[in-house]
Amino acid sequence: MQVPYDLTSYVRVLKLASTPSWQEFSQIAKIAGAGILLVGILGFIIFVFMSFVPG
């Protein structure tokens, strides 16, 4: 691990990073929320299916 190289790459990334606009943030939040909701619904469907299957 080369510490000076790692630090310079971190500094370069931080210089390129910028704060997202409100529109960009809300779009990302909506997409992430839809993904979480989709995974939750899928898990619930699997749960309901497994409770009706005799085990």
Image (cartoon, rainbow, N blue to C red):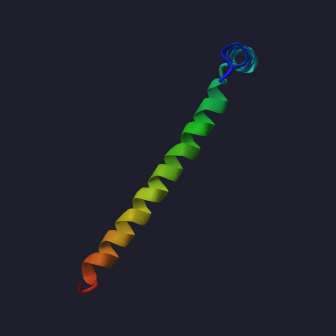
x and y percentages locating residue 36 in the rendered image: 47, 50
Q: Is residue 1 left or right of residue 44?
A: right
Seen from the viewer's position, the closer of residues 19 and 26 is 19
Q: Is residue 8 left or right of residue 33?
A: right
Q: Which quadrant would residue 13 be assigned to in this image?
A: top right
The image quadrant where one finds the C terminus is bottom left
Q: Residue furthest front?
A: 1
Seen from the viewer's position, the closer of residues 28 and 8 is 8
Rendered position, 47 above or below 23: below
Q: Which residue is drawn at the image coordinates 32% and 70% (left, top)?
A: 47
The image quadrant where one finds the N terminus is top right
Q: Is residue 11 left or right of residue 50?
A: right
Q: Which residue is drawn at the image coordinates 43% and 65% (left, top)?
A: 42
Rendered position, 21 above or below 33: above
Q: Which quadrant would residue 8 be assigned to in this image?
A: top right
Q: Which residue is drawn at the image coordinates 60% and 38% (left, top)?
A: 28
x and y percentages locating residue 6 in the rendered image: 68, 19
